[in-house]
Amino acid sequence: MLQPNFFNSVFTFPILNIIALYHYLFSLLKLPGTLGFSIIALTVTIRVILLPFFKQQMDTSKKMQDIKPHIDRLAQKHKGDAKKLQEEQMKLYQEAGINPAAGCLFMIIQMPIFIALYQTLQLFFVADKIKVIHAMNNALYFSFLHFKSLDAWFFGINLAATPKQVNTIFIYLIPLITALLQYLQTQTTMAMSPQPAPQQNQEKNKDGKKTDSGSDFQNAMNTQMKYVMPLMIGWFSLNMPIGLALYWNIFSVFSIIQYELHKRTTETLKILPKA
């Protein structure tokens, strides 16, 4: 329980301290459901911290859209030479200042944070509250942040329980909302990503008709991202603490808003007359 290892020191302990800080501040304000508000405030804090990575992801998507016609021409030109095509694409990326891995960085960074938050909320499940509070307080950086008690209730909802444990129709709406928000987030993200060329990597099937293998593969991946991923997230939220769904949903709402703001800003810059 909260052993001082590398992962806990880098991710779990800082998250626990941020939650404890907000819990302390909201307790001073006499707000009910301080843990829920602390998770919401933590989400906002993480979004602010990750803003540079988010902006990098958006900038990369925009640059990829700009060079897409060039990528398509290279794909047609070097259709039979995969090695040459890869070399030319890498040259084009370098000229455009694009790091292909930058788009994945935002998601990669989120995962350890999500795992650390899950481990933190799991502490509220432990029956021996005195032992848990002692372990949590030992991980806090300042004594004034120490927990005196653990209350996981937020407007009548136990954030430490799973929807399956609560087992009410109202609570089962939470994984549905989580899946819906993830779908909207994926839809917004995909709208800003370049799509494959309609005539790229064509092959003949058994009937002698041309098929677009590259486009078919991309469409299959898009379908999985658009439908399968939200269903998976919804299933996870059904079996995980409701506090995690709260974090995930607030995070998705912020993502959708930031994507839309970035999109509108980009469209506005396009129609502004050049000086």
Image (cartoon, rainbow, N blue to C red):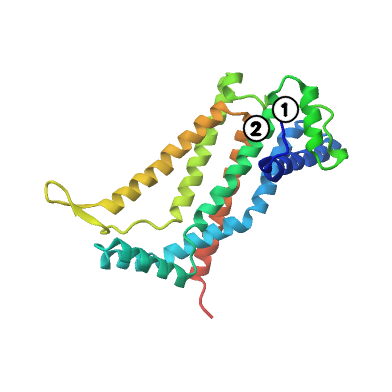
Say if 221 sits above or below 70 in the image. above
Q: Extreme bottom residue here?
A: 275
- Number of marks: 2
In the picture provided, is 222 more to the left or to the right than 272? left
- Give the residue displayed 48% in from the left and 51% down from the top: 189
Kind of residue at badge 1: Ala
Q: Is residue 256 visible?
A: no
Toward which corner of the image does residue 203 lie, by quadrant?
bottom left
Say if 4 sits above or below 235 in the image. below
Image coords of residue 134 (percent x, y): 81, 29
In the picture provided, is 144 more to the left or to the right than 250? right
- Give the residue displayed 42% in from the left and 43% down from the top: 226
The tag on residue 64 is none
Q: Is residue 148 visible?
A: yes
Q: Quadrant of the C terminus?
A: bottom right
Kind of residue at badge 2: Gly
The 10 Å Cα crowd at callout 1, few under 14, some 14 to 19, many 20 or more, is many
Residue pointed to by mark 2: 243
Q: Earlier in the sequence, mark 2 or mark 1?
A: 1
Image coords of residue 24 (percent x, y): 82, 38
Residue sitting nearer the eye, 6 or 123 = 6
- Give the residue displayed 63% in from the left and 34% down from the top: 118
Q: Extreme right residue here?
A: 144
Mark 2 lies on a secondary structure that is helix
Q: Extreme left residue here?
A: 207
Mark 1 lies on a secondary structure that is loop
Residue pointed to by mark 1: 152
Q: Are marks 2 and 1 in contact (CB under 8 Å)?
A: yes
